[in-house]
Image: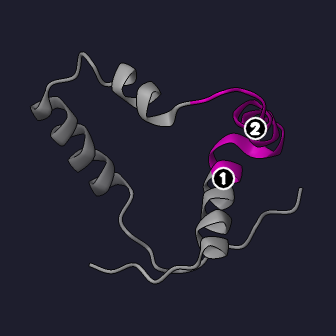
Amino acid sequence: MINNNSTAEIVERGYNCLFEHLGTIETERFISFILSERFDYTKWRREYFKNVTLDEFLDAAADYDNAHPFCPEKPQIPIE
């Protein structure tokens, strides 16, 4: 499947997720950390999942998908 979202749309969706799940203050702290540290996302994720079996990962992904069905509506950035 080809994704035609622009970089700006992807960034906006990412910010929306952060604001929704972390709130304004923790989102700002997260962004500050990512920008100020030499952060290797791939290395971090490998470490995070190193003790997870494939079946555990697939079960967790299925559970998450069931709990968070895809919604193509474009959310607005919350103003707090």
| Residue type pointed to by label 1 | Glu
Q: Nearer the viewer, mark 1 or mark 2?
A: 2
Image colouring: one colour
- Left or right of 45, for residue 13: right
Label 1: which secondary element = helix
User: Most extreme residue toward the right, as rendered?
Assistant: 80
Residue 22 in picture, x, y percent from top left: 68, 41
Mark 2 lies on residue: 35
Residue 43 in picture, x, y percent from top left: 43, 27
Label 1–label 2 contact, CB within 8 A: no
Label 2: which secondary element = helix
Q: How many marks?
A: 2
Residue 46 in picture, x, y percent from top left: 34, 26
**Quarter of the rendering occupied by the N terminus:** bottom left
**Residue range (magenta):** 18-39
The front one of 40 and 69 is: 40
- Left or right of 15, for residue 36: right
At a point 60% along the width and 29% down the height, the residue shown is 39
In this picture, is 9 found above or below 57?
Answer: below
Q: Residues within 10 Å of mark 1 (few under 14, many from 20)?
A: some
Q: Which mark is residue 20?
A: 1
At a point 33% along the width and 80% down the height, the residue shown is 2
| Residue type pointed to by label 2 | Leu
At a point 17% along the width and 39% down the height, the residue shown is 59
Q: Is residue 19 magenta?
A: yes
The front one of 14 and 71 is: 14
Can you tell which quarter of the image residue 68 is in?
bottom left
Q: Is residue 70 magenta?
A: no
